Structures are given as C-alpha cells and as structure tokens.
Image (cartoon, grey):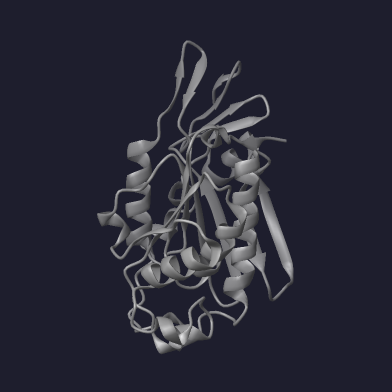
Amino acid sequence: MHRLDNSFTQRHFTVTVVGCGGTGGFVAEGLCRLLPRHAGLALIDHDRVEEENLTRQNFTREDLGRFKSEALARRLARKHGRTVAYAALPVGMVELALPGIVIGGVDNGLARRDIAARLKGFSTIGLINQGYVSRPNWWVDAGNGENYGQILIGNADRAIFEKDVCYAMPLPTLQRPELLAQAPSQEPSCVQIAEQGPTMNLAMAAVVLEVVRRLIEGTCPWMQLYLDLAEGTLHSVPATPGAVTRILGIKKQKIIQKGGGTR
C-alpha cells in the first residue's frame, strides 16, 4: 500500500478551492473545520450568486448578486474566526498560493487547463544523487453529473514511488485527458438544466474532504475515486505503479521506483 507524500505540511501551506459553486462551496465550509490553524485557505471564483443557486449550493439570499468567492469568504471568516482569502477572477489570472493543495470544482476544460499550467510551473520533483527533491502541490479535481462523480488526484507529469510513499502522480488532466475537451456550459446556470441531483454536491464534498484530510495526515492511498449515488457505491483506485500503468499505459507515462529504475 502506497500513501501520497504529505511533506508539504512541514511548513506553512495553503488549500485553494477553485470553483465555489456546487461541490466547492460545501468543501470550503468543511475546510474551515478541518484545516489546522496555521494552514491558509483561499477561494477562487468569478461567477456571481443567482437565485437558482440557492437550492443546491452553499449560499443564502443575502449572497444574491455577490461574487461567490467573496460571499463565501466573508461569511466563513466571520463564522469560523479565521482568515479566508478570495479572488473574483478566472483561475488563469490568479497566482496560486503554493505549496499545498488545489481543489478543483470547475466544470470545463479551459479552467482545468489553467490549473494544470499553474501546477506544472511550481512542481519540482526529480532525482538528485539517487534521492528525491520534492515540492508536492497536490491537485484534487472533482467533477460530477446528475448522480455520478469522480475525484482525481495528481501533481506532476509522471509517477514517482519510493518504498511505501508516492511522491508524484500524473495530473488529473493526464489521467483523464477528455476532461480538457469539456466545454463551458452555455446555460445561465447549471442548476437550471437539472444536471445533478439535489444531494450530489454535498456527497461529493464529503468525499473530497476525506481526501484532503488523508493527504494532510499522510494516509491517502488513492489516485482516483468514483461515487455513484444511483448504485450507492464508492469505488477507489489505489496509487500504485500497476494502477498508473493500467490507466495511462507505460508508453505514455514514466513510472520511477527508487532502486527499480524507470519503467
């Protein structure tokens, strides 16, 4: 059993939620209870709260017309007595605070491409004198439909394992390249077209928070999770060299194991 590296917790780190509607808004609330006091929390979303958001997202009537990131940040800061930073801009225009964890709650390929570009620039994972130099910045990407959702975890362009620790895992956009082709919704609000059940966002948020909890503790063994409320199932894919090979193929992705060379 491999666990994902949590060395980022040895110093100040920040958890950033990109996309505060749907799953992201409930994740932000849970993080205020979950994160240690020395950890930073930041919210990024340039959309405004609409009437239709009130049934399935973490907003109230007092938030109508305000930027989602600002409304949540101000409310959560007051409620939980902690600093919550926010940006009412697209993620491509924001400098991510790293090291730490980026939680993606976006619904289109363009935003995911921007997150991937940011993390590629900050990810320093390599082999030096047969040892590892690592600045892990984990990306936890969450996406869902009506009753089904997936969570993908990654931080680099390859997989690196040493004994029972996974230092690097391919980015979510490498694990599931089709996510980059997802077009932004042309509807004024995703809830108007009933793309998801009324409890889907809450269910996804609970699983995302468990992933974050385990990442911080150093006990997260997964690279993917799949939730199906219609079937009542949660399927996990462990972070192992074999799983990376099955999902990506050896030709597409290098897998480095200390003492075992490159496959």
Q: Find residue 263 and report its horizontal and vertical position in percent.
A: 54, 26
In the image, residue 37 sits, relative to residue 259, either above or below, namely below
Q: Nearer the viewer, residue 126 or 45?
A: 45
Tally of numbered discs: 0
Q: Residue at x 61, y 72 (%)?
A: 202
In the image, residue 50 sits, relative to residue 81, either above or below, namely below
Q: Is residue 109 left or right of residue 56?
A: left
Residue 124 occupies which quadrant of the picture?
top left
Q: Find residue 218 and report its horizontal and vertical position in percent.
A: 65, 38
Q: Residue at x 66, y 49 (%)?
A: 237
In the current view of this chain or complex, which residue is farthest to the left?
A: 93
Q: Is residue 220 visible?
A: yes
Q: Residue at x 38, y 43 (%)?
A: 119
Q: Find residue 9 and report its horizontal and vertical position in percent.
A: 55, 37
Q: Find residue 107 and report its horizontal and vertical position in percent.
A: 42, 67
Q: Nearer the viewer, residue 76 or 237?
A: 76
Q: Is residue 20 visible?
A: no
Indicate the quadrant containing the N terminus: top left, top right, bottom left or bottom right: top right
Q: Nearer the viewer, residue 7 or 234?
A: 7
In the image, residue 191 sits, relative to residue 157, either above or below, namely below
In the current view of this chain or complex, which residue is farthest to the top?
A: 129
